[in-house]
Every structure is written in structure tokens, then in C-alpha cells.
Image (cartoon, rainbow, N blue to C red):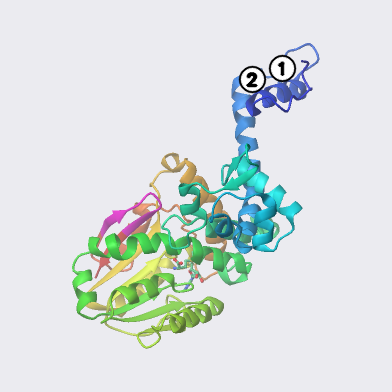
Amino acid sequence: MRAGELAWDLPLDEQHRLCDADRFSKGDGSMSAAQGTALDMDKLNAFIGQFVTDLGASVHTGMVVIGEKLGLYKALNAGPMTSRQLAAKTQTDERYLREWLSSQAAGGYITYHAETDTFSLSPEQSFALADEGSPAYLPGAFELALGSLAAVPRIAEAFRSGSGMGWHEHADGVFHGCEKFFRPGYAANLVSSWIPALTDVQAKLERGARVADVGCGKGASTLLMAKAFPKSRFYGFDYHDQSIEAAQEAAKHEGLADRVTFSVAKAKEFTGKDYDFVAVFDCLHDMGDPVGAAEHVRRSLAPDGTWMIVEPFANDQLKDNLNPVGRVYYSFSTLLCTPCSRSQEVGLCLGAQAGEEKIREVVRSAGFTRFRRATQTPFNIVYEARP
Ligand SMILES: C[S@@+](CC[C@H](N)C(=O)[O-])C[C@H]1O[C@@H](n2cnc3c(N)ncnc32)[C@H](O)[C@@H]1O
């Protein structure tokens, strides 16, 4: 076989090798980069292999959003079925569905059984894609990614102008996807391990405490805490009115509206005093003036109160964040967090990979005397700050 002829029955990496040879050959079989330096073909092939994976993942984002929106994963959860059977069950067009199923099977998100020409979900695929109660429910992440990417033209322009883009200016998928993606992690960790890792907080919440959840978005964290601690009173605040309206609806829907109040307020302006516990989930770094917000939290706390700061997992040094989790966070930070902070007063732009030292600096500057890392997961660090 000559370079340039792709054999579709060859493994993908072999196809890459042949394809690369054609693209970069000078005609005499040798390879060189534009700058005239010799190319290491193994490294080039590895990089192009990564590119194919990444390109597939990029378009796969839309596939997962479609799958969730149309209930395809949940319908497939019933057992192996053909594309025709799944189309009948979900009232979708069989031809579109077959193409979607094929993309999912190629990406390892569903399982194909060639002998029966049927598709199914393995227990693990089902856990992550069809069970909304699972701590590893993933589709929200793709909805968040798709929503964030809609801002690319404006963010590219912001690279030149330096202007910001507020959270409220993004596509709806950002708000819905964020809540859907974060809620399972909070459900798995917040009540069972994050709150118990704080000094004295759990006992106070069990006895009955005043709690503020600042930057609460659609209120997933607030409602989870309210359900777990029925004697406590909860106040959720966010500057984004649409998110607060959704949170109010959710509180009513879950029968918690008598103990949970959601209000539109900026982190430097939320109302109430003598809170026993104030929490911020994945939003301190989004704020333009996190030090101003921290000062306001300190003034709003009871003298022996606690501030819990949940931030994305990050090390202090860039070199230590250059991994798949860091890549996810730095990318979301470029599209969402940094522009959000830039759009507000001060515009400190901590970024989603701030790391402990920068968070400690914010907390100390605001007058808190105690600060520690209480616990962590692969995706989050939980800090405790006390006046
Ligand atoms: C990444 S979302 C996290 C939402 C929610 N805490 C969660 O974990 O699901 C960031 C939130 O911070 C809010 N936010 C950003 N700046 C704010 C500010 N200065 N005051 C109050 N909320 C703010 C946004 O509106 C958004 O809801």
C-alpha cells in the first residue's frame, strides 16, 4: 500500500501513520517541518492520534446533549435493541438515530453487538449516562461545554479588547449544564464528607443554624443542605436573576420553600447577619472582587461562624496543573470564569485554577484569622475560613 491510500479496515493508528506520511512527505520519503527541522514521526503520530481523539470528543459534545435531550440513553437502558426498536421507543427518526448510535458506539459511550446488530449500555455506561441520581452523571458537563462554546466569537474578541463577559450573558445551556453537572458531585460529597470535615459545623446544622449559600446559581447545593438539615434555615444568593428564579421554583417543587429563601444579590451585598455558616461553591474565583466578597462574608458571620469555600481542584504551580483535569478547568476558565470576573468591579481574575495560596491570600486580606484545607476530591478543594 502506498502513502495516501487509506485502508479503512486498518486500526486507526495505522491509518494515521499512512495519512501523515502522505501529508508531510517531500516526495523522496523524508519528512521535515516548515522551519526545516527534522520531524520525529513517532511524536508527530502520537500528536495526531491525540488530535483525532480530541476532534471526536469535540463533536461528541453535541451527540451527548442530543442523547440526553431526547431521552435516548434512558430508553436504551431497558436492554439491547436495534436502531429501529429504539426509534420506535423514543419516537425518533431511525436513520438519524442509527448515525447517532454509531457515533456513540465508536466513542465507547454505548456498546454495539455485531452479531445481533443491537446496541446497549453496560452497567458503567448506564451509571454515567442514564441515571440522573448517580454521582457520576455526565451529560450536564457536555451541556455546559456546548453552552460555553457558543461564547467563542465574543471571547476571541475579548482577547483583543480585554473586556469581560458576565455569567448572565451566556447561553442557557451554561446555567442548566452547570447545575446538572455539579449537583451529582455535591450530592455525593457535600453532606457526607465536606460538612463533616469542617470544625463544629455539622452539629450546628443538626441543632438548627442560619446558613447563607452565596453565588448559589440554581440552588442545587442549598437544597441538598436544606434536605439534610431540617432544623436549619437557608438563604441562597446569586446576582443572576434567572438562576434565582429557577432556584425558587425548585425550592417550591421540593417542598422546602418554608425554610429556604432565594434572593438576587451580589456577593458583596447579600443581606442578613449572624450566619452560623456561609458557603460558596465554585464561584469565588468568578467574582471580580473576591476580597470584597470575603470581607462581606466575614461581617455577615456570627463570631464563631464558619465560611466554607469550595473551589475547583488546583495546585499552586501551572506545571502541576498540566493534566486532563487542569485542561478542563483552564478551558472553562477562559470561556466563563475569567471573563465573568473581568466583567465586574476590580476584575481580579483569579481563574478556575487559582490554587490554595491565592485563595489563602484572598481570605487573609479580608481579615479572617484561620484558614485551612479541610478536604478534597479529584475535582474540588474544600477550604475552611473562620473570623
Ligand atoms: C460556576 S457557577 C456556580 C453556581 C453554584 N454555586 C453551583 O455550584 O452550582 C458561578 C456562579 O457565581 C455567580 N456569581 C458570579 N459573580 C457573582 C457575584 N459577584 N455575586 C454573586 N454571584 C456571583 C454566577 O451568577 C453563577 O451562578
Mark 2 neighbour density, 10 Å: few (under 14) some (14–19) many (20 or more):
some
The location of residue 170, given as percent across then percent down, is 62, 67
Residue 118 in percent (x, y) is at: 62, 45
Q: Is residue 147 above or below residue 344?
A: above
Give the residues drawn in magenta, as a range.
372-382
Pointer 1 local density, CA inside 10 Å: few below 14, some 14–19, many at least 20: many
Residue at image coords 52%, 64%: 178
> In the image, residue 288 lies at what x, y percent?
49, 67
Quadrant location of the C terminus? bottom left
Considering depth in this image, is 202 or 100 the residue closer to the camera? 100
Query: What is the residue that sits farthest to the bottom in this orientation?
Result: 258
The image position of residue 201, as x and y in percent, is 22, 70
Instruction: In the rendered structure, find residue 41 and report the number of the disc placed on it.
Output: 2
Looking at the picture, which amino acid does disc 1 mark? Answer: Met
Q: Nearer the viewer, residue 34 or 151?
A: 151
Q: Report whether 205 appears left or right of 127.
A: left
Quadrant occupied by the N terminus: top right
Q: Residue at coordinates 40% horizontally, 86% vertically from top-left?
A: 257
Using residue 349 as the reference point, say whether residue 143 is left or right of it: right
Q: Which mark is residue 31?
A: 1
Amino acid type for the residue under numbered disc 2: Met
